[in-house]
């Protein structure tokens, strides 16, 4: 069970400890609650408190398509095999980047070398998301953000050959494949004109 779910359960049991729902003998008006199970009470509690399962992570790009996966690959600029520590998502310049979960903007680094404009976003359970090559930031450092809210716009700043979003995920300080926790459709890259890549086509030659 995650820390988050545990804290929800804990809050629930602290609450029911005071509402004495299981003793229905003293007040006939409470007969209606006699047959309720703990599960019923818990379901009602979740509805009352409007608690959602915040462990469902969402793609930072609506309808996102992965164009380069996490792992070793031939680097399109440096022409050597290198570890690609994130995933690349197809994104025309100015595409809204959405928070993948509830969290907080922990750092903003404009013109951060080859990473370009970079945003660091902290979520639950030790997760830190890093978004690179952004064209602009839509939020400020320390801002608390709800899942699905725009935090930046994608671009082609830093060392890239075309606009796209490079997204990394660290859990407790170590890089992991973002696709291990977030589901994004993976589509085969099929450029329309393979011999003449458009400079604005974010689907190829990425870093
Ligand atoms: Zn990349």
Image (cartoon, rainbow, N blue to C red):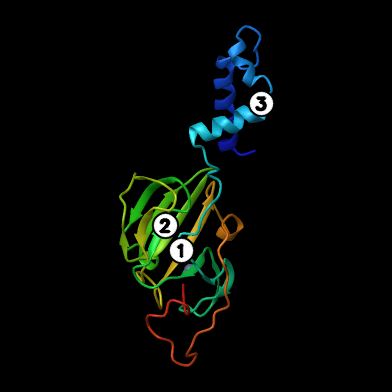
Q: Quick one: SS at disc 1?
A: loop
Residue placed most toward the observer, 74 or 191:
191
Q: Is residue 127 above or below residue 20?
A: below
Q: Residue furthest top?
A: 26
Q: Looking at the picture, how far across and down is residue 43, in whole percent?
A: 60, 33
Q: Name the residue under label 2.
A: 98
Q: What residue is rendered at 54% in x and 79% in y?
A: 189
Q: Name the residue under label 3.
A: 38
Relative to 161, 18 lies left or right? right
How crowded pointer 2 is (Cα within 10 Å; few <14, some 14-19, many 20+) is rated as many
| CA distance separating discs 2 and 1 | 8 Å
User: Which mark sits nearer the N-terminus, 2 or 3?
Assistant: 3
Label 1 and label 3: CA atoms lie apart by 39 Å
Residue at point 32%, 48% (across, down): 141
Residue 41's spot in the image, x, y percent?
Answer: 61, 27
Q: Earlier in the sequence, mark 1 or mark 3?
A: 3
Which residue is label 1 attached to? 62
């Amino acid at each position: 069970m995650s820390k988050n779910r545990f804290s929800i359960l804990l809050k629930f049991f602290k609450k029911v400890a005071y509402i004495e729902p299981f003793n229905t003998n003293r007040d006939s008006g409470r007969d209606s609650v006699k047959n309720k199970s703990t599960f019923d009470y818990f379901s009602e509690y979740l509805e009352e408190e409007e608690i959602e399962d915040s462990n469902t992570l969402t793609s930072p790009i609506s309808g996102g398509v992965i164009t380069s996966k996490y792992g070793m690959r031939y680097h399109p600029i440096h022409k050597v095999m290198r570890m690609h520590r994130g995933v690349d998502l197809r994104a025309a310049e100015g595409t809204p980047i959405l928070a993948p979960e509830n969290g907080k903007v922990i750092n903003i680094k404009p013109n951060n070398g080859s990473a370009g404009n970079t945003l660091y976003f902290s979520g639950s359970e030790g997760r830190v998301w890093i978004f690179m090559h952004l064209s602009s930031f839509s939020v400020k450092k320390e801002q608390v953000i709800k899942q699905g809210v725009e935090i930046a716009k994608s671009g082609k700043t830093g060392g890239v050959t075309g606009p796209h979003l490079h997204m990394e995920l660290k859990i407790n300080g170590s890089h992991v494949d973002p696709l291990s926790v977030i589901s994004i459709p993976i589509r085969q890259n099929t450029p329309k004109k393979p011999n003449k890549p458009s400079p604005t086509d974010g689907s190829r030659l990425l870093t």
